[in-house]
Image (cartoon, grey):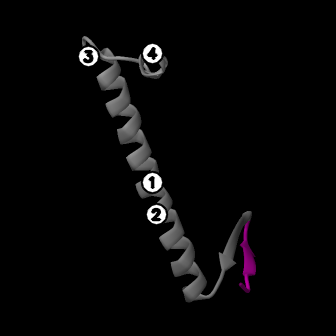
Amino acid sequence: MTVQTLKIGKREFVFLPKRDFERLADLARRQTEQDQQDAGDVAESRRRRKEPGGSTLAEMRKKLRR
């Protein structure tokens, strides 16, 4: 990946080929989707933990070992 930098005033800008930009944008989009999925999984886990009769992982392990 070839990158060219340009400074205008106190701000720096980066120029890179469109193909590389699209690849980086796709990676960022996939990461965002994964972060959203992870946040949903955490919310679901918390919701289930608050349900009456719910079991923790430690409790399930104890039950399975019996």
Give the CA separation, mark 1 to mark 3: 26 Å
In primary-sequence order, the first of circles 3 and 2 is: 2
Give the secondary structure at mark 1.
helix
Give the CA separation, mark 2 to mark 1: 6 Å
Please tell me which residue lies in front, 9 or 12. 12
The amino acid at mark 4 is Arg
Look at the image and say whether residue 5 sits in the magenta stretch: yes
Residue found at x 73% / y 78%: 6
Look at the image and say whether residue 40 sits in the magenta stretch: no
Magenta stretch in the rendered image: 1-9
Q: Which residue, as the protein is rendered here, is positioned at the far top? A: 52
| Whole-percent x, y for residue 19 in the image | 56, 87
* Count of marks, rendered view: 4
For the N terminus, give its image quadrant.
bottom right
Q: Name the residue under label 4.
A: 66
Residue 2 vs residue 61: left or right?
right
Query: Taking 4 as reference, is 13 above or below it?
Result: above
| Whole-percent x, y for residue 50 in the image | 31, 16
Give the CA separation, mark 4 to mark 1: 37 Å
Q: Are marks 3 and 2 in contact (CB under 8 Å)?
A: no
| Whole-percent x, y for residue 59 in the image | 44, 15
Which label sits on residue 51? 3
Give the secondary structure at mark 4.
loop
Residue 20 vs residue 30: left or right?
right
Residue found at x 74% / y 63%: 10
Q: Do the residues labelled 2 and 1 touch (CB within 8 Å)?
A: yes
Q: Nearer the observer, disc 3 or disc 2?
A: 3
